[in-house]
Amino acid sequence: MEFFWTLYSLQTRDLLDILLVATVFFVISFFLRGTQAMALLRGLVLAGGVAIVVSSVFDLRAVRWLLQNIVGLLAIAIPVIFQPELRRLLERLGRTGLLINRRIVPDTLRAKIIDDVCAAAERLSERRHGALIVLERNSTLQEYIRTGIALNSDVSPQLLLTVFWPKTELHDGAAIIDSSGRIASAASVLPLSSARNMQQPKLGTRHRAALGLSEVSDAICVVVSEETGRISIANGGRLIPRLDAKRLRTILNAFYGPERTAGQSLPQRARELVNDWVIRMRERQKTERQKNA
């Protein structure tokens, strides 16, 4: 009866309140999905639910007292346990909030950069020369640019092929294309991924560095494997492997194509984020089908 009375007494403000809380939990679960924190959080919720049901059914006062007093400890423990995931969540929320005042790359230059990166990646893949090319978007990468050798040059396939030639001094690091559409640096050092449950545990240092940068920024990382010559893309903490030149161009057009954020409203930006998420999910499904085949 209390349940039906609560439903009957609901007002528009109450429904809005419930919707906002549900949205907050959905957003948090979306960013934690596929991480080690999600499995740990699922275990905590399951263990807590079982303890609450058992203490209520059998009237276990000691267990109920423990559950009531452990909430305060969880308020301190959860930020410590989930510190990397919470940091990543706040950074992504900050990037998807207000527009950042930055130099906007013209559409024609973006298209040229995509063509040059695809051409260079295809040739590097054929020659099995390892490469790591980073495309800067909203998040600034100046701290990583400073770790490399400054170039400040136009993007071209020939320059990228020269940078990643195995006998050059610059081939071991990352080449970063900044927000102005120029190669800002080469041989830059990137942070390695902190994820403990990678899709492919035997990933090399280049792939781990690409994943690591994509976890702390919205940059797009194009990786060419030195061992297999396969092309991959890291974005949003996920790796899209085994790409050919056509799929690489499609994904780069979706993630780095003509500028879509300038002058857009928040609903329009939300649609773009959903579209990017759908593309990542489709690529993930293709990868899983290839593994099962």
Image: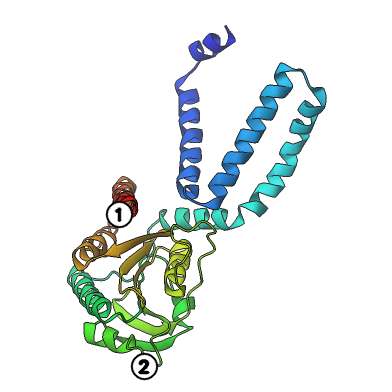
Where residue 27 appears, as percent x and y from the top left, is 46, 43
User: Can residue 193 be seen in the rendering of this structure?
Assistant: yes
- Label 1 belongs to which residue? 290
Residue ID at (44%, 22%):
12
Q: Secondary structure at mark 2?
A: loop
Q: Nearer the viewer, residue 226 or 261?
A: 226
Labels 1 and 2 touching (C-beta < 8 A): no
Type of colouring = rainbow
- Label 2 belongs to which residue? 167
User: Can residue 156 be seen in the rendering of this structure?
Assistant: no
Going by the picture, which residue comes out furthest to the top?
1
**Residue 54 appears in which quarter of the rendering?**
top right
Where residue 232 appears, as percent x and y from the top left, is 33, 66
Where residue 291 appears, as percent x and y from the top left, is 34, 54
Specify the amino acid type for callout 2.
Lys
Specify the amino acid type for callout 1.
Gln
Few, some or many C-alpha atoms within 10 Å of disc 1 (few <14, some 14-19, many ≥20)? few
In the picture provided, is 225 more to the left or to the right than 245?
right
